[in-house]
Amino acid sequence: GEGDAGDQDVDEDGNPKSEADLQAELMKKKLEKKKHFDSSYDGVEENEELAAERAQLDAQRKLNVDEFGADDDDDRRQYLGIEPGNYVRVKIVGMPCEFVRNFDPRRVVLLGGLTAQETNFGFIQVRIKKHRWHKKILKNNDPLIFSLGWRRFQTMPLLSLKTVVAGEERNRMIKYTPEHMHCFAQIYGPITPPNTGFIGFQTLGGETPGFRVAATGVVTELDGGQAKVVKKLKLVGEPQKVFKNTCFVKGMFTSPLEVAKFEGASIRTVSGIRGQVKRAIKGENGVFRATFEDKVLTSDIIFLRSWVQVFPQRFYNPVTSLLAPSDRLAEGWRKMKTVGEIRRQKNEPVPVEKDSLYKPIERKPRKFNSLKVPRALQAQLPFASKPKNEVKKREQTYQAKRAVVMEPGERKVHTLMQKIATIRNDKVKKRKDAQQQRKVMLEKKLSKQNESLNEYRKDEKKKRFRKEGKDQARADYKRQKSQAFE
């Protein structure tokens, strides 16, 4: 090996090579390796937009060389700025002393600048999606660490989905992120331009097993709190006084002001009778007058379906992990813990409310009074309309008391008919048992088919949502490129 290395340091005549010759040979080898690498990985043709952008950069670079090539370095920096590959010295004002004291040169520090509007804070609407490799779905208002732009901070996203009900578009609050599709979220943080991507983490510690990236997404708009997020509200009341098509309802509101807010709203009973809120009753808090399509019963339950606005939390906790020593990063920044993490640390079980459990609904059958028609009215009715119900008599009549004595011939016929009926009942029973067995076998067969069909539908649903996500990401990328060129 030493002989080969010595042969490489001399030329053909045996004279030692100069430093310039050695540098030229080394550069030649590097160019050959780069050419081989480019031929292996750069075989894909460039699209028109990338080729046009590269040509524009080459033309600008050539123009800069022609214009400022003869100037010295100081003049060139004044017009062109710092060229890539040069060392610069940066003076940072207002740096915390902990950063200097615990500085570790092994950790890479990125420097960036912020525009004037990015120093402001407000509500941002983002489109977020749970990462497919993250094991658990994300919960509404659970703290999440966002890496957005030049900042890393912890905030509480308010999840929602856009739905169209009766021609009206609403941002409806959801409790958890969907499995394989995007949803919207309102967060409080620094103002960031739209189409800026981000990633979300639940923790920054290295002890977390599995995949740590919890969510990805992009900023859609700066709503400033104008995008209203609503959730369902169901108010329940009961009749106080019942008239023909009007009734006084109590227990739904607590003051006349609340009644005035819901004047004209649609209400409904459990039996399906529709109605409308009219006006509050003077002197009684929360009682109002309502009209219905039909007469309601005193035992009916009246409910009102409405929407109530939900506001996102104004919580912003910047990540300051660089202010702590490298071996104790957790001490430099305290994050907000989720409710689940606090319960696991304290070994507390999940509280169960009895009112939140599902219970079997038991409704007693209602008994209605029989219809009684006055005798004077019955006398005026025609015979076809008169009630013909036989009244049950207290004492047995002669027909029920008399004894029936059969003749010998009648007794034989009666016995024969009983035997025929017994045989027929036995056949009917066997037929019903066989039919029940066939029904059980068919249900088992259908259950197996439904299991395989559900698995197929689940796979197809995943593929469709994955394709839609890729198409949406591709469309966003094209829109960003078009905006960049504009």
Image (cartoon, grey):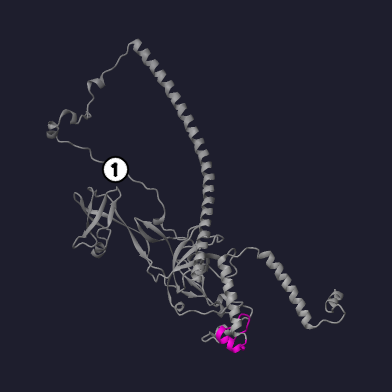
Please provide percent x and percent y for residue 407.
Answer: 32, 11
Q: Nearer the viewer, residue 5 or 147?
A: 5
Residue 66 belongs to the span the image colors magenta? no
Magenta extent? 70-90
Number of numbered discs on residues = 1
Residue 253, located in which quarter of the rendered image?
bottom left
On the image, numbered disc 1 is attached to which residue?
Answer: 366
Front residue of 344 and 256:
256
Disc 1 marks a residue whose amino acid type is Arg
Is residue 343 among what the camera can see? Answer: no
The residue closer to the viewer here, 310 or 438, is: 310
Asked which quadrant contains residue 327, the reply is bottom right
Image point (21%, 59%), residue name: 279
Left or right: residue 433 versus residue 390 is right
Residue 154 drawn at (x, y percent): 49, 72
Q: Secondary structure at mark 1?
A: loop
Residue 172 locus on image (x, y percent): 39, 60
Residue lying at 58% horizontally and 68% vertically, measured from the top left:
51
Secondary structure, magenta segment, majority class: loop
Determine if the magenta segment contains residue 76.
yes
Crowding near the residue tagged with mark 1, few <14, some 14–19, many ≥20 C-alpha atoms within 10 Å = few
Q: Position of residue 174 (x, y in %)?
A: 43, 60
User: In the figure, is residue 263 to the left or right of 198?
Assistant: left
The N terminus sits in image quarter: bottom right
The vertical placement of 211 against 97, above or below, is above
- Which quarter of the picture shows residue 120? bottom left
